[in-house]
Amino acid sequence: MAEDQNHTRSVLIAIGANLPLGGQSALKTCEQAVQALRSVPGLTIEAVSRWYESTPVPPSGQPSYVNGVVRGVTSLPPLVLLDHLQAIETHQGRVRSVPNAARTLDLDIIDMGGLCLGTHRLVLPHPRAHERAFVLYPLQDVQPAWVHPLTRHTMEQMRAAVQGQEIRVIG
């Protein structure tokens, strides 16, 4: 176990929000989430993507989302990192109701150094990341050479598959 404690791996974390928190915009909440991630012990943020605005997937009539991705390195085990992400979400007003509900903040682990994991709490790599422009566009900003650990598809192949999903750079 001590050996695992000293092992670090790369990590890609998607950030998204589409509900204001109090009078604060979803973009401001996402920016605050990056700052919160910087304070997680055992996690070092190396790069932050540009911010994007996208329509909800699947379509739902909800407000547009603000999305980004951070790249970092961590010595934390996957479920411990997930616990930290969920604590940040809760602190930012996240309420877990139904799947794909509108939210003040959503933090998802997309990949952890190519680790393949399937538990009731966490599936790695993220099972739908490769189907979503709102993940792939900001992910390309921070890790353009990323290859999906299971499908072996390149960023170019995955982005071609999501053409037509509405997304635009906002910052």
Image (spheres, helix red, strand yellow):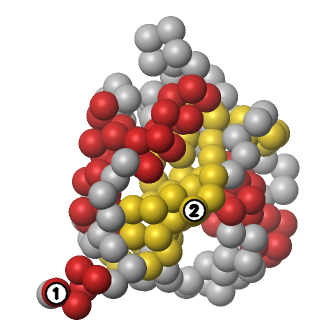
- In the picture, measured across the screen, residue 87 lies left or right of residue 60, that is left
Element type where label 2 sits in the image: strand
Residue placed at 34% from the left, 40% from the top?
88
Whether residue 52 appears in this view of the structure is yes
The amino acid pointed to by label 1 is Ala
Residue 142 is situated, as x and y percent measured from the top left of the image, at 68, 62
Residue 25 is situated, as x and y percent measured from the top left of the image, at 58, 19
Q: Report the Cα–Cα distance between label 1 and label 2.
A: 25 Å
* Towards the viewer: 119 or 16: 16
- In the picture, measured across the screen, residue 127 lies left or right of residue 153, that is left
Residue placed at 74% from the left, 59% from the top?
141
Nearer-N-terminus badge (1/2): 1
Q: Is residue 95 above or below residue 23?
A: below
The amino acid pointed to by label 2 is Glu
Please rate how many residues cluster around mark 2, counting C-alpha atoms within 10 Å: few if below 14, some from 14 to 19, many from 20: few
In which quadrant of the rendered image does the C terminus lie? top right
Residue 57 is situated, as x and y percent measured from the top left of the image, at 62, 43
Element type where label 1 sits in the image: helix
Q: Is residue 43 above or below residue 171?
A: below
Residue placed at 22% from the left, 90% from the top?
3
* Towards the viewer: 165 or 34: 34
User: Which image quadrant is residue 157 in?
Assistant: bottom right
Most extreme residue toward the top, as rendered? Answer: 23
Instruction: Kindly indicate whether the residue at mark 2 contacts the one at mark 1 (C-beta within 8 angstroms).
Output: no
**In the rendered image, which residue does mark 2 sit on?**
46
Most extreme residue toward the bottom, as rendered? Answer: 3
In which quadrant of the rendered image does the N terminus lie? bottom left
Q: Is residue 169 above or below residue 113?
A: above
**In the rendered image, which residue does mark 1 sit on?**
2
Residue 126 is situated, as x and y percent measured from the top left of the image, at 48, 65
Please rate how many residues cluster around mark 1, counting C-alpha atoms within 10 Å: few if below 14, some from 14 to 19, many from 20: few
Label at residue 83: none
